[in-house]
Amino acid sequence: MHIVVCVKQVPDWDIPPSSFKVDEGAKKVVPPPGVAPVTSQFDAIAAEAAMKIKDAGGDTKVTIMSMGPATARETIKQGLAMGGDEGVLISDDAFNDIDSTAAALVLATAIKKLGDVDLVLTGRQAVDWDTGVTGTLIAEMIGGPVVTFAKAVSVADGKVTVERVLPDATEKVEATLPAVVTVSNELGEPRYPKLPQIMAAGKKQVTTWTAADLGIDAAALAPKLTLEQLFVPVVDTKVEIIEGETPEEQAANLAKRMKEAKLI
Amino acid sequence: MEFQISEEHQLLRGAVRQMLSRHEHQKKAWREMTHRDHKFNYELWQEFADIGLLGALVPEEYGGNNSGLLALTLGFEDICTMGFSPSLMLVTCMDTACILKNGTEQHKREIIPSVIAGKTILVFAITEPDAGSNSFRMQTVARREGDRYVMNGQKIFITGVEVADYMLVVARTTTREQIDAKGLPKAFGLSLFLVDPKTKGITKTPIPTVATEGVYQWQLFFEDVEIPAENLVGVEDQGAMAMFNSLNPERILVGAICCGMAEQAINMAVSYAKERKVFRETPIGAYQGVQHPLAEAKIQLEAAKLMTYRAAWAFDQGMEPGVVGSYSNMAKLLASDVALKAVDASLETHGGIGFAEETGLAQLWNGARVLKTAPLNREMILNYVAEQELGLPRSY
């Protein structure tokens, strides 16, 4: 069993809102100074799903794959410290600022280059742009089924069994391998690596591939999505005190005011 | 010259922060438990063990991960930056380093794996009422009688005895009178012993103090305490060097604690200064009177971090203990100075709310202040640097 986990390095989301800045002219997020980027949380949970499969036994190899700048190696190393076996960093200036479709093309091409992949795990969405389509697009491109929003993933007899999160229920589905599964936060918190595993991760190999290694030319990466505008919305908060002599009167006045404001 | 923190160290920092963030909701209750009730935080101790911090200085053959003092230093710093406390890890790790360097194979096989697993806590007993900064004045004596030593004397300000499984006790195996009579060097005659605090003949009295988290300070009386001879750590009478060498990691880790405290205080101040408005809609952080003390503390903190990291790196490289000693002492002095400065600037930024217990800043002040004096006061460090680094004569 060969599992590939796709992980993305993103700006740290755990910063005060006042530290979040965008360059509206360039339509880019300005990385907060002095704050190191982190692994997208859903991708770390996808890595956790892979480690759970590995823990369950059997001959399982986990490859941690990331497309991004040279610093994305840190995100790969984190996956290796969690228990991954090998890393693949896909890094090339041609891949800067590409859209989800192009990112899926790059990742799918790398997965095909690995050759023997049974299962691809991704986060349900990256926590920077939240498009949530890359995993599905990878499945389309490698020609396998996709199961989204997984809260539990197990593998047996050439099939992957997934418990899917629905708005008010859980759905259990099976898919034949090779397949792609996107993992949701309901799977549980990712394990954090411990020092012995961190030291071991230092010895694990990370292979770097460029656009040329993957045989991808720039034309194939042309965006299918146009970003029209990027801005931080202004949130206007007003406080209104609802009067009333008794709690019942206060509640009635609150309901009346909410109806007036068309909130209910 | 390489200023980049390695990938492994980055991963460690991420892991420590990830682990602690899962306990963020317990932080307030833990602070009350440790600061107000002086109760030891066993849950957090086990987390430190599970993530591997207690095995950082231990080679793999004894069950450790051998990640080194720099890794431990970064871990300590982040623990304090996030507002938690490494507690007795400081002395336990320092004792661990000492046992690994000087102990018998039996000590290493029997005690160290249990320390790494979080099951055994070690503390250090050196200070005496008349032997503080000058350890050579200590009078506690361990006399060899057959297959055991018999210890008599007293110790004071010994941290965490109530939760310790072993104390690493420094005692005289040759008295000062014998040394003077034979013309032996003053460093001769000290020995290290692993002593179970529950051993018959040890009387323990807690000393109420502020700024000790989760544990008490103790006064100990030893009256004909019998210690098995195999509990001697290192060579009899030759304990001074073993002791001083293990004080280097202590200084470095104190530096890391101070850096973390300073970082925490600065972070709190910056966050508050961005939100707090006193005059119209301008946050107080826009005022240079508020900015400059914080900026100065930040600059000095960066310097303290670099010195602390260099000292830890030098220890990991196996450099001469004297060289590591200079680096460690200088780092400790600078870091403890900046911790106080940063907490003071943070209190000034917060104003009245800074003294409310809920912010934790007043407790942080106590913690930073005690580390100006302990484990070695800044005057003794300045003496050391003047003598060792500048070659100036000794006045005492």
Image: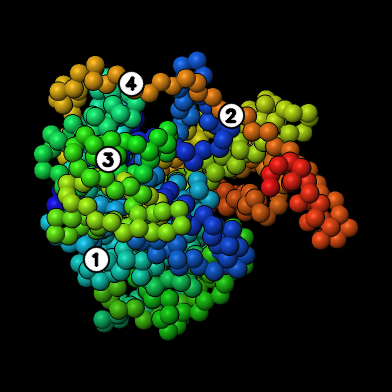
Answer with mark 3 or mark 2, whichever residue precedes in sequence. Answer: 3
Does dot 3 land on a helix, a strand or a loop? strand
Callout 1: chain: B
Q: Are the residues under marks 3 and 1 on the same chain? A: no
**Numbered mark located on residue A223 in the image:** 4
Q: Nearer the viewer, residue A229 or A95?
A: A229
Does dot 4 land on a helix, a strand or a loop? loop
Residue depicted at x 65% and y 39%:
B272
Q: Are the residues under marks 3 and 2 on the same chain? A: yes
The 10 Å Cα crowd at callout 2, few under 14, some 14 to 19, many 20 or more, is few
**What residue does disc 1 label?**
B108
Q: Picture coordinates of residue B383 (x, y %)?
A: 48, 42
Q: Is residue B231 above or below residue B96?
A: below
Colour style of the rendered protein structure:
rainbow
Callout 4: chain: A
Say which amino acid is labelled 1: Lys
Say which amino acid is labelled 2: Pro
Q: Tell me if B59 is positioned left or right of B207 in this view.
A: left
Q: Tell me if A76 is positioned left or right of A171 in this view.
A: left
Say which amino acid is labelled 3: Cys
Q: CB of mark 1 within 8 Å of CB of mark 2?
A: no
The 10 Å Cα crowd at callout 4, few under 14, some 14 to 19, many 20 or more, is some
Marks 4/1: CA–CA distance: 61 Å
Q: Is residue B292 above or below residue B70?
A: above
Q: Picture coordinates of residue A49 (x, y %)?
A: 29, 53
**What residue does disc 2 label?**
A233
The 10 Å Cα crowd at callout 3, few under 14, some 14 to 19, many 20 or more, is many
Callout 3: chain: A
Of tags 3 and 1, the one toward the viewer is 3
**What residue does disc 3 label?**
A6
Answer with mark 4 or mark 3, whichever residue precedes in sequence. Answer: 3
Of tags 1 and 2, the one toward the viewer is 2
